[in-house]
Image (tube, rainbow, N blue to C red):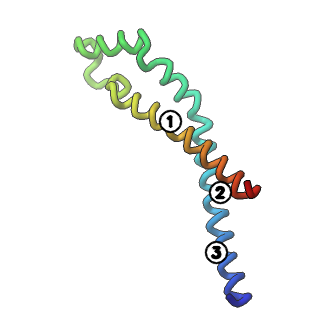
Amino acid sequence: MEQTERIQLMEQMLDKAAAAVDELSAALDRYDQAREAIRTLDEYYGSEAWKDDFRADEEGLLPAGLKRGVLSEDAAWNVLADNRELTVRLLETAAQTLRDRNGL
């Protein structure tokens, strides 16, 4: 590979890496801001309060126009399960990145 070709290729790698790092950093910032919401949702889902709310919905006691996806058994479960899978993926990615960089 010629020197100019190599420099052009490495410039493309730099652009790709910089964009990915910036995008991941922004996504992690948004995720950090949502972690308290995830923790609160996890505590609510399956709690006595959730069960009371679920029963009230089943009995038609809630307002008709009330958004209540959180009372579906799948919506909250799926988000919490996806969060657990994402957490494992983040750990695996971080570990692999460290291994790649340090030659481990």
Q: Residue at x 76, y 56 (%)?
A: 102
Q: What is the residue that sits farthest to the bottom in this orientation?
A: 2
Tell me residue 6's x, y (percent): 69, 83
Query: Quick one: label 2 or label 1, which is nearer the N terminus?
Result: 2
Residue 67 seen in the figure: no
Mark 2 vs 1: CB contact within 8 A? no
Residue type at mark 2 is Val
Which residue is label 3 attached to? 12
Instruction: State the separation of the CA atoms marked 2 and 1.
Output: 21 Å
How would you rate the neighbour count of disc 2 (Cα within 10 Å): few for under 14, some for 14-19, many for 20 or more?
few
How would you rate the neighbour count of disc 1 (Cα within 10 Å): few for under 14, some for 14-19, many for 20 or more?
some
Query: Quick one: label 3 or label 2, which is nearer the N terminus?
Result: 3
Which residue is label 2 attached to? 21
Q: Residue at x 55, y 44 (%)?
A: 89
Question: SS of the residue at dot 3?
Answer: helix
Q: Is residue 35 above or below residue 2?
A: above
Residue type at mark 3 is Gln
